[in-house]
Image (cartoon, rainbow, N blue to C red):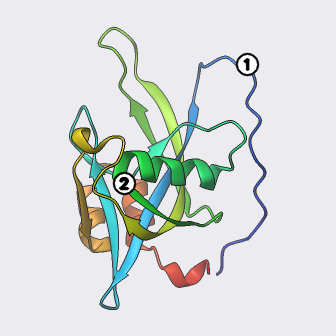
Amino acid sequence: MSPIKTKQRRLKLGNTPKTGVRTQFGALCWRMNNDTLEVLLIKSRKRKRWIIPKGWPMHKATPAEAAATEAWEEAGVKGIPSEVCLGIYSYKKLRSPTAPPLPCIVAVFPFEVTEIHDAFPEKGQRKRKWMSPAKAASRVPFPELAQIIRHFDPRTFN
């Protein structure tokens, strides 16, 4: 089965209340290294767990463009985003100690890495590491994300 390809629209964000389930966009950063597929994981800032770059929707950006921006800011990589959503996963975002966790769903977009930079906005706050999809899937704390990574094949969306 191949993914359905549709043209994404740029988001127009209004003044909607920020309560309930929130949506984020994540980048599954990948590259071929000597004919071997590798994916890039980063450490989260507070809990130091292995995750993918992700963030909030951005005004006048498609979901894939927003994910690409997060890949640059959090992992220092640039490349080619795909507008094909690989899947979604959910988690609870921890905020302040007194605020309840915020339920989030993350739409994951493939992002072919073509450039790796040593200087990037969150360099001092995160560690990054390339690994096989199987190893990456075993390291992420979210079962749905692990499944997306484990079954990722860049040939299915090109």
Q: Residue at x 65, y 79 (%)?
A: 2
Residue at 30 percent of width and 50 percent of height: 119
Labels 2 and 1 touching (C-beta < 8 A): no
Query: Which disc number belongs to residue 42?
Result: none
Distance of mark 2 from mark 1, alpha carbons? Answer: 31 Å
As drawn, 62 above or below 55? below
In depth, the one of 105 and 37 nearer the eye is: 37
**Residue at point 48%, 79% (across, down):** 153
- Residue 20: image quadrant is top right
**Side of 133 where 55 appears, left or right:** right
Closer-to-camera residue (36/4): 36
Image quadrant containing the N terminus: bottom right
Count residues near mark 1 (Cα–Cα under 10 Å), then give few for <14, some for 14-19, many for 20+. Answer: few
Q: What element carries label 1?
A: loop
Q: Which amino acid does label 2 sit on?
A: Gly
Q: Mark 1 points at which residue?
A: 15
Q: With respect to residue 152, does 116 lie above or below?
A: above
Question: Mark 2 = which residue?
Answer: 76
Q: In this view, does 92 lie to the left or right of 87?
A: left
Secondary structure of the residue carrying numbered label 2: loop
Q: Which amino acid does label 1 sit on?
A: Asn
Query: Residue 83's spot in the image, x, y percent?
Result: 65, 63
Dot 2: within a 10 Å radius of its alpha carbon, few (fewer than 14), some, or many (20 or more) residues? some
Q: Residue at x 61, y 53 (%)?
A: 65
